[in-house]
Amino acid sequence: MTAPESNQSVESLKDDIQRHVALTLGSDPFPPRKGRYYLGLCYSVRDRLLGQWLETQRSYYDSITKRVYYMSLEFLPGRFLMNYIQALGMEEECREAVRDFGLDLDELLEEEWNPGLGNGGLGRLASCYMDSMATCRIPGYGYGILYDYGIFYQTIVNGYQHEGADNWLRQDSPWVLRRGHFMFLINFYGRSEAYEDSAGHERFRWVDTESVMAMACDIMVPGHQNGHVTNMRLWKAISTRDFELEHFNRGDYIGAVQSKVESENISKVLYPNDTSPRGKELRLRQQYFFVAATFQDILRRFRKNNYSSFDCFPDQVAVQLNDTHPAISIAELMRILVDEESLTWETAWTICQKTFSYTNHTVLPEALETWSVELIGRMLPRHLQIIFEINRRFLDDVGKRFPGRVDLLRSLSLIAEDNGKQVRMAHLAIIGSHTVNGVAELHSKILKTRLFKDFDNLYPGKFTNVTNGITPRRWLMQANPALSELIGSVIGDEWIHDLSHLSELAAYADDPEFQQRWQEVRKRNKKLLARYVLRKLGVGINPATLFDMHIKRIHEYKRQILNVLHVITLYNRIRSGSVAHHVPRTLFFAGKAAPGYMQAKLIIKLINAVGQAVNGDPAVGNDLRVVFLPNYCVSQAEKLIPAADLSEQISTAGMEASGTGNMKFALNGALTIGTLDGANIEIREVVGEDNFFLFGHTEEDVHRLHSGGYDPVQIYESNIELKKALDMISTGFFSPEAPGLFRPIVDSLLAHGDYYLVLADYAKYVAEQARVSKCYEDPALWTRMSILNTANMGKFSSDRSIMEYARNIWKVSPLT
Ligand code: 9GP
């Protein structure tokens, strides 16, 4: 179902745009100005979705159906306007309407700020899943926090990352619908008090608390041209002082206002994923704030259906924990059921385990959350008691099944003792959930065989895999209109709803005429990107060169350093004339480093320093260019990915849980150079070994090398090109003003054991890059490989992932 014909016409759109400019914004519609008309268009498009949204929400009630609650502290939706327009099927009408006012739709789209409510992969995945839930008509809601400040705004000053505040809500967003009537009281601190109930049982209540209000702010997430609009509900903290006027009346006006501001800080800022947000009290407050508000909302909806008992709660409610950030939900639901609803512990626990499922997104030990017992005890005293009780019962049970295994009890316990007492949130999430999943086959296997091996033995069948996916609507249709049109011209548009249809493209992989059209589209995209780079950085790049992209968070395990070593190697070869023939390349880097992660920030500086040396060297000319694009975000990815020839997915095997950038590139026809890591393995399986550039040690090799015997210094000594590249870095070739600047990078590789095995993979990587260049010189071969990549990406639609979650984990069916 799309919007009724009448309000889809160009004329009605134009009327609405002008009406909104005049009556909503209070501006003179003449002459038409970009900023105002952009907002006028936003409101006009929003109006057309609101009816569908209300109808969808009503249909959930009418069919009293089981709903999915996707709880995530991060979402990265990207810009909304084009997404809404395409969901309504109104792109042509919108183009024409604004054209009639002398404006250009593509320029208006650039007015929109990216909501940076996430750090990277995990948040973007949550947004792909929202899109797929809506498109597949899965009755679901996303829940999170409406941060006033999203992920920081990155600028590059003298090669260094600078962080600025991302005040994305400074002008009200047309997409955020504030729902002042959905407010919940959230408690913190205080103490847990025991009392006897009327039947003489000991019970507990949480008293002397401090509180804050959570206000619902909704953002619509439309399905693609199906009339289904899902809701993303983000909570904003509002001080209870607003409601307690007597505080003001006591005369301490400034004190009262200050404490109001402090309590509203909860939803002020997204935590950038520094190596360790743990111990940061505000972060735990954010987690509990959004959990407590979400559960009050879930229970409100559950009660609306007049159920006589909580036994049917899991038949109505499926809660997906996106990583451990919402894991305190398990203690919160237990508290509600036991303390407020007076259920027995056993009944409440059964309900919990049937309600929750948990997705793990990382095996990196530093990213596995723990909270100190002291902090939880102070902020959430009743929850700590509940966690202890869950642990006591759990360990009793383990003890009975495995008598005498103290080692096992220690490894499984919810409480770690080695570094002061800490609550292991992943253990809480595993015990309290019916299903735990990893996000790619290899990652799920590592969870079962290494990280959570003892849990897997204890609960056979609890661990499973759902390989990540991406939405074809944003990542092909919207990001790459030219390629979408070409695909549509030969196989039709069914791929938009069912990506497996792309396989029909394989029949054209060797067709010279189709190949030529494919190349033309790719050239056009590369030209557009070159123009964007010129505008942004003032750097000219040649679209005829091989566009090689490494765009993702800057982290040692993602090995931007390995790529830099290859760049320096190419640079040295060009300078020394040691290669008779070189395929010209442009290297693109983009990504943010966590503000507290010094090594990652130094890597950014190194990339820029190498870029400066290479780009400024007349001996290199057009043969090699390095650009670092600041402030990587969803919209920038949409510009970069369709123009890529080569996608760098070169993490140390076993360390990238899945990756989703790898999928976006392959879907858009870039070829991958990658390790056997995360979803790379499954991508290679479907696109075919011949259409993928593989190198590097496997996860098992990595495990073995980590167990002993790895000597990076010996590799350094024995590889002349590698030695030269590292020596240039460490002796100040790229930092003549401060020769020792990059020593910490070289030290991490030589003096500190090269944990990420950069040196171990260097030679194979450089050799495989040579094969990349050779293939690129054969346009027919390269284009064939590129077409076959796109053609075989059907599996990686987030629609497939969502339907797997729905069928196997949530047990919900699409609404008809
Ligand atoms: O690092 C993983 C990335 O590999 C994965 O694709 C993404 C979505 O599942 O999650 C990332 N993990 C995090 O952002 C934090 O655990």
Image: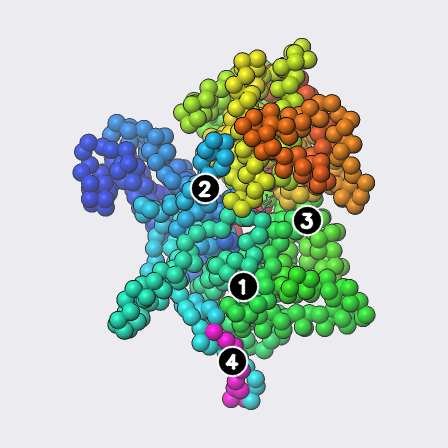
Q: Is residue 338 above or below residue 501?
A: below
Q: Which mark is residue 193?
A: 4
Gap between marks 4 and 3, in whole Å?
42 Å
Query: Which range is magenta?
Result: 190-199
**Callout 4: helix, strand or loop?**
strand
Q: Which residue is mark 3?
A: 444
User: How far, Cα to Cα, is label 4 from label 2?
Assistant: 45 Å
Q: Is 747 or 368 nearer to us in this picture?
A: 747
Q: Is residue 736 magenta?
A: no
Badge 2 or badge 1: first in the primary sequence:
2
Image quadrant where residue 708 sits = top right
| Near-viewer residue (175 or 590) | 590
What secondary structure do most residues of the magenta stretch adopt?
Answer: strand
Q: Please report whichever mark, 3 or 2, sits nearer to the chain's N-terminal start.
A: 2
Q: Residue at x 36, y 50 (%)?
A: 176
Q: What amino acid does circle 1 point to?
A: Ser
Query: Mark 4, mark 3: which one is toward the viewer?
Result: 4
Foreground mark, 3 or 2, reads: 2
The disc at residue 329 is 1
How would you rate the neighbour count of disc 1 (Cα within 10 Å): few for under 14, some for 14-19, many for 20 or more? many
- Disc 3 crowd rating (10 Å Cα; few below 14, some 14-19, many 20+) is many
Q: Nearer the viewer, mark 1 or mark 4?
A: 4
Image x and y of residue 586, in percent: 55, 22
Residue 163: which numbered mark, if any? 2
Image quarter for ligand 1 equals: top right
